[in-house]
Amino acid sequence: MSTCAAPATPDPAVTVVRRARVPGRDGAVDIVLAGGRIRSVGGVVPDGLPGIDAGDRLVVGGLVDAHLHLDKALTADRCSWSGGTVEDAMAETAAMKADFTVDDVATRAGAVLASCVAHGTTRIRTHVELDPTVGRRGLEGVLRAAADWAWAVDVEICVFAQDGLTGSPDTARLLDEALGEARAAGRRTVVGGAPYADDDPAGQLDRVFGLAADHDADVDLHLDLFDGTAEGALIGTLCALTERAGLGGRVTAGHGTAWSFLEPDRRAAVLDRCAGTGVGVVALPSTDLFLTGRRTGAGAPRGVVVLDRLVERDAAAAVATNNVRNAFTPYGAGSLVRMANLYANLTHQASPEQLAACLDLVGPRAARVLGAPARTTGVVAGAPADLVCLDAPDPGTAVASLAPVRWVLKGGVRTVTGGSAQLHPTV
């Protein structure tokens, strides 16, 4: 079973956050909360209201991990590490999935959720593999862990085919059944795939969009994960399908490493097409940096798509974790601040404004990738009272310094209290 650290007697709901540094505001302000949402930011607040003091530190909306794999997390100790390519990682994972149990998945997923929560994450989209090898065990384990941690983090599930779809009727059946069950239970339905791993990549896209139509589901794809080339990229096809299906704002493409090998003008055109058709893009720097550049000699590429064009156009974009210590990524602890810092480093973001935009890519802009309206993301009146206090004065410093979490609120209730290191100098 997954370990759930929910308090036996939760703290009473916070009514006001005092002395908070909020992105886009000068000086410290007070934030009034009511009914699990933000009522006001700034203005005069009466004394005596119960609350929490930010101590003139940065307070941002709850961090959002738009692309995470809970079902295969924390399996690095089961890997041989004989290669390190995408194909090697897929083969390693396919072999170990046969031994997954519901309890095993729930325990590992719960451990990752605990770490994500401690690092300020309050919303996650997790991709869960369905196929004849693992059956429903991964899905059931993740559902169990998500239920255990629902007091601290919202988890939505994208069911997807990692190892191919067009040649596997059983995988198609499992996806169809899981989407039907999610819809019947009132859960958000999201379907995905990995066309690069299918014998018929374009055919897989058609199948995924067919499932989306059948179940009124959003689409979230592992797309164009190629090392050293953009040949065969399907982003144009995905944008055309999105337009045809009228799913603008409900389709996401993760990875896109192939686009990083394009000349700047061509890459800008790809991202403009995504913005114009409402296809969100998620960069996954830890995984894609680890997997790419292995077949190149001198001047190995970074393999991480730069999202600046989407930020400039105020389009949906995010930076996310993807994997935590498994065959695809042997690193990580669920820290989105670390991921924003890594993305900034890789893509040469340096100014305070650029670094602040990186934090936005794991916050309000990432929430928009998952369908949240722009007007209800971040620290604004009407948004959920999901708040994170980071030990920094501003967003740029938070990213540059890997600022630790001081506390987290979920729906106005404190879920995390962080500590600070104590120094003990010799006298």
Image (tube, grey):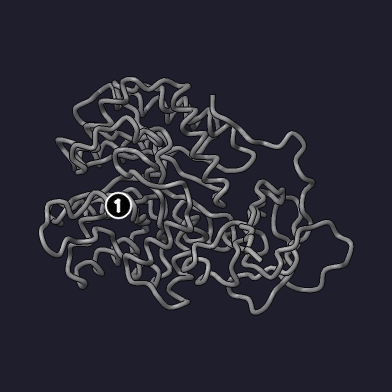
Q: Residues within 10 Å of mark 1 (few under 14, many from 20)?
A: many
**Furthest residue toward right:** 48
Q: In the figure, 376 relative to 77: above or below?
A: below
Q: Is residue 275 visible?
A: yes
What residue is shown with label 1? 255
Type of amino acid under label 1 = His
Q: Residue at the location (25% across, 63% down)?
A: 270
**Furthest residue toward front:** 427
Q: Quadrant of the N terminus?
A: top right
Q: Secondary structure at mark 1?
A: strand
Q: Nearer the viewer, residue 134 or 393?
A: 393
| Residue 94 in the image, given as x and y percentages of width and height | 26, 28
Q: Residue at the location (50% across, 52% down)?
A: 64
Q: Nearer the viewer, residue 120 or 378?
A: 120
Q: Quadrant of the C terminus?
A: bottom right
Quarter of image, res 236: bottom left
In-image side of 58 versus 414 (left or right): left
| Residue 373 in the image, given as x and y percentages of width and height | 53, 58
Q: Residue at the location (81% across, 73% down)?
A: 44
| Residue 164 in the image, given as x and y percentages of width and height | 23, 33
